[in-house]
Amino acid sequence: MSKLLLVCAGGAIGSGARYLVGSWAVAAWGPGFPWGTLAVNLSGSFLISAVMYLGLEVGTIGPDLRIFLAVGVLGGFTTYSSFNHETLALAQRGQWGLASAYVAATLLGAWVAGLAGLLLAQFASSGS
């Protein structure tokens, strides 16, 4: 039960953070492209890679904190379902090029961000 509470508490924080990032992105760049969701997915991919590496490979993040951060906070923060909905909306409006660019930017960007998070966590934990 305590692990469930960690996930729920973390999820509330992550969901709130996702809302704030999305609102900020619309205010900064307008609603024409889902910049907020892209920013959330890229930063979430970076952070979850670092947290999981430090938790599972290095052991500097204990199991409860890892569950709180990775499953709770970052699970509530990342927004694949929003990404899918926004991609379909762009396609339904006939903006196939923009939809394709969004898919490519999200998938490649999340992969690169995840790799960067892993490499940073490896570097930081190596004592260098």
Image: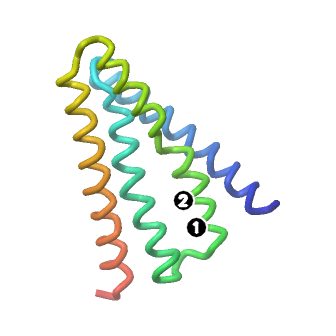
Q: For the point 28% across and 64% down, which residue is it?
A: 116
Q: Residue furthest top?
A: 93
Marks 1 and 2 in Cβ contact (< 8 Å) = yes
- Hey, which quadrant is residue 12 in on the image? top right
Is 96 positioned to the left or the right of 8 in the image? left
Is 96 positioned to the left or the right of 10 in the image? left
115 and 107: which is toward the camera: 107
Amino acid type indicated by mark 1: Arg
Q: Which mark is residue 70?
A: 2
- Give x and y (percent) for residue 66: 58, 67
- Give x and y (percent) for residue 119: 29, 72
Q: Is residue 120 above or below residue 8?
A: below
Instruction: Count every numbered label the image shows and give the total.
Output: 2
Q: Is residue 83 above or below residue 4?
A: above
Q: For the point 46% across and 81% down, which residue is it?
A: 57
Is 105 positioned to the left or the right of 25 in the image? left
Amino acid type indicated by mark 2: Ala
Q: Which mark is residue 11?
A: none
Image quarter where the C terminus lies is bottom left
Query: Please, what secondary structure does the residue beneath circle 1 have?
Result: helix
Q: Is residue 104 above or below residue 114?
A: above
Q: What residue is shown with label 1?
A: 66
Label 1, label 2: how far apart the Cα atoms are: 6 Å
Q: For the point 49% across and 38% down, which residue is it?
A: 18
Is 123 positioned to the left or the right of 4 in the image? left
94 and 105: which is toward the camera: 94
Query: Please, what secondary structure does the residue beneath circle 2 have?
Result: helix
- Give x and y (percent) for residue 71: 58, 56
Q: Which class describes the residues within 10 Å of circle 1: few (<14), some (14-19), or many (20+)?
A: many
Image quarter where the N terminus lies is bottom right
- Give x and y (percent) for residue 44: 42, 51
